[in-house]
Amino acid sequence: APYDDRGLFVETGGNWGIYANTSDVGVYHYSGAYKVASKAIVAGKQVVDVRYNGTNLTVAVNAVDGTPVAAGTLGSIANDLRLGANYSSGAKFAGSILEFISA
C-alpha cells in the first residue's frame, strides 16, 4: 500500500501523503478507497511536483507530467503532518529533500 512506502510528506492517519521508493514517486489519498498517482523515477536528483486540484491527483518528475488520477474529495486533515517518514514513522525517507514548498 502507498502509505507504507517511504513518506516524503504525509498525514499521520494514513489518509493522504506523498511517498517515494526506488522506482517511483507518488501521491495518494483515501476517499472510500486509496487513489494513487505516481511517476517513474531514476537514480539521481529529481524535481518532483505533486498537485491536487480538487478533482485529480498528478505527479510530475523533471517537468514531465504523469497521468492524472481522479481522486474525489480530499480525506481527513485532522491529524498531524510528518516530513520524511510514512504515517507510522516506520519507513523513513533515506535521501535529501532540498526544498519543500506547500501552497
Image (cartoon, rainbow, N blue to C red):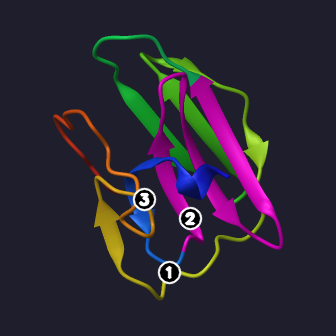
| Circle 3 residue | 86
Q: Residue furthest top?
A: 43
| Circle 1 residue | 77
Q: Position of residue 70 (x, y in %)?
A: 80, 50
Q: Residue at 32% of width from left, 44% of height from top?
A: 93
Q: Quadrant of residue 64?
A: top right
Local secondary structure at mark 3: loop
Q: Residue at 56% of width from left, 64% of height from top?
A: 16
Q: Nearer the viewer, mark 2 or mark 3?
A: 3
| Alpha carbon separation for disc pair 2 and 1 | 8 Å
Q: Please check the rendered image and state whether residue 94 is part of the magenta-colored stretch, yes or no.
A: no
Q: 94 or 99: nearer the eye?
A: 94
Report the label total: 3
Local secondary structure at mark 2: strand
| Alpha carbon separation for disc pair 2 and 3 | 10 Å
Q: Position of residue 84 (x, y in %)?
A: 28, 52
Residue type, mark 1 in image = Ile
Q: State the extent of the magenta-drawn residues as a range.
A: 14-39
Residue 16 tag number: 2
What predominant SS class does the magenta segment belong to? strand
Residue 24 in the image: above or below residue 52: above
Q: Please check the rendered image and state whether residue 21 is part of the magenta-colored stretch, yes or no.
A: yes
Residue type, mark 2 in image = Trp
Q: Residue at 60% of width from left, 71% of height from top?
A: 15
Task: Count neighbours of disc 2 (C-alpha within 10 A) and say few if under 14, some if 14 to 19, many if 20 or more.
Answer: many
Residue 80 in the image: above or below residue 6: below
Residue 61 tag number: none
Q: Residue at 67% of width from left, 40% of height from top?
A: 37
Q: Residue furthest front?
A: 90
Residue type, mark 3 in image = Asn
